[in-house]
């Protein structure tokens, strides 16, 4: 007997979002934040993600406005840049991941830092007013925060800071919340990752669920 | 003051894996399974993933042998295919994602199924002996399982079945375990996703941690 299952992609999305809204505690989010949180939970498969999601005041509106004005999206990893749904971008925004740039390995060696941190250096010409999406590397977020301590360094419009893992992830997100250089969104602690980060971008890019 | 953090990528990996081995209960895994489970936990940021990870007997050895013999890796999503570390592949294995193929939308409409399920149809010339890596779409896994009920359909060497989410994910993985068409690895329930799936492939591709 063949397995029977829902084969309508739109119906799967609707039922998924309805399940999340029935099970997760989303009451503390503004309406603009709630649609972002729902997609982040959707990507993780965990309604227990909700209490770990945090937004700076005004983040969702700032990030959405930047995207609608044509801001590029700067991503720390190819899994992030490849996951963003191009059809949802409001004005064909550029999606940029500098990690595969051939300059990166030598730059990392010269900096004494990871390739992910070195790739952030190559964001500089695109960074002013951009939306930053970090879903993998704590070192990319730490390096960006250190650079943003210079008031003359170009400033993104918003930072999605969701690096994942056991070494530096929680600390880098705490540093983002503490420094508060621009409006941010994080998943606190060890959780995060490229899928959750992509989900936040996809939610901010279009008002269509 | 600039933030101080670990900037040596190899040291970050070592410390991450050591933290996972200190905190997660991995005792029920064979040595071949343990290295796969550790990387899956690493990608998720959750030691609580361990009890949800399940392997069919012989899966890790079968998947590793297939990769070492040159098997292609068939991925349901671009986030999976883009995440696999090419430098870890033993013999430059092909990494294939048919989802962006221009035939897929019309095929999906004709099948009355999702694009992810339609993309599985295009795996057929590559499927015999391949390693399948499904990290997103329950419909891709369900469709593959229904096809494999035909004994003449080409058979992969192993299936990593880790679709994520609220509608069909848990059910599709239960169906894989129940049908048991070839050796498999799953994350039970709603959890899963492209990063966890990529981590399993990367662990199987090379014995180097």
Image: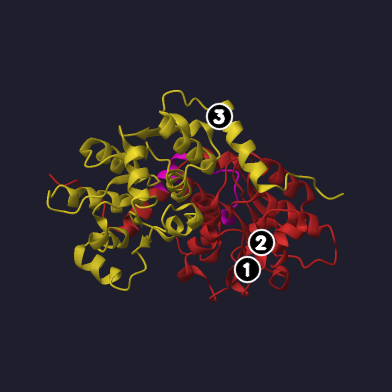
Chain colours: A yellow, B red
Q: Is residue B178 left or right of residue B203?
A: right
Q: Are marks 3 and 2 in contact (CB under 8 Å)?
A: no
Residue at 70% across, 63% down: B106
Work out whether residue B137 or residue A30 is closer to the camera in this orientation and state it.
Answer: A30
Q: Kindly identify which residue carries mark 1.
A: B102
Q: Does residue B129 appear left or right of residue A30 in this picture?
A: right
Host chain of mark 3: A
B59 or A169, which is in the foreground?
A: A169
The magenta stretch is: B18-32
Q: Of the residues tagged 3 and 2, which is closer to the observer?
A: 2
Closest to the observer: A90 or B29? A90
Q: Nearer the viewer, mark 1 or mark 3?
A: 1
Would you name the residue on which mark 3 appears?
Answer: A21
Expressed as whole percent of the image width and height from the top left, the position of residue A199 reads 47, 46
Quick check: can you spot residue B119?
no
Disc 3: CA contacts within 10 A as few (<14), some (14-19) or many (>=20) = some
Vertical position of residue B122 compared to residue A144: above or below = below
As measured in the structure, the alpha-carbon distance from the residue carrying label 3 to the one carrying label 2 is: 30 Å
Location of mark 2 (residue): B105
Secondary element at image label 1:
loop
Looking at the picture, how far across and down is residue A28, in whole percent? 41, 24
Q: Magenta segment: does it hold A155?
A: no
Residue A177, x across and y down, in percent: 27, 36
> Same subunit under labels 1 and 2?
yes
Check contact, mark 1 vs mark 3: CB within 8 A: no
For disc 1, the chain is: B
């Amino acid at each position: 007997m063949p397995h029977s299952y829902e084969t309508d992609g739109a119906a799967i999305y609707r039922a998924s979002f309805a399940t999340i809204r029935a099970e997760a505690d989303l009451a503390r989010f503004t309406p603009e934040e709630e649609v972002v949180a729902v997609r982040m939970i959707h990507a993780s498969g965990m309604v227990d993600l909700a209490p770990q999601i945090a937004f700076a005041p005004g983040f969702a509106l700032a990030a959405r406005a930047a995207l609608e004005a044509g801001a590029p999206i700067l991503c720390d990893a190819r899994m992030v840049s490849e996951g963003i749904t191009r059809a949802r971008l409001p004005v064909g925004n550029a999606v940029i991941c500098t990690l595969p740039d051939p300059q990166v390995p030598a730059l990392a060696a010269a900096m004494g830092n990871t390739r992910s941190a070195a790739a952030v250096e190559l964001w500089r010409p695109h960074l002013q007013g951009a939306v930053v999406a970090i879903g993998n590397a704590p070192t990319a977020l730490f390096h960006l925060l250190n650079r943003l301590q210079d008031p003359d360094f170009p400033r993104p419009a918003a930072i999605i800071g969701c690096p994942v893992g056991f070494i530096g992830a929680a600390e880098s997100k705490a540093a983002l919340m503490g420094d508060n250089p621009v409006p941010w969104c994080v998943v606190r602690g060890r959780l995060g990752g490229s899928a959750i980060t992509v989900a936040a971008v996809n939610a901010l890019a279009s008002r269509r669920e």
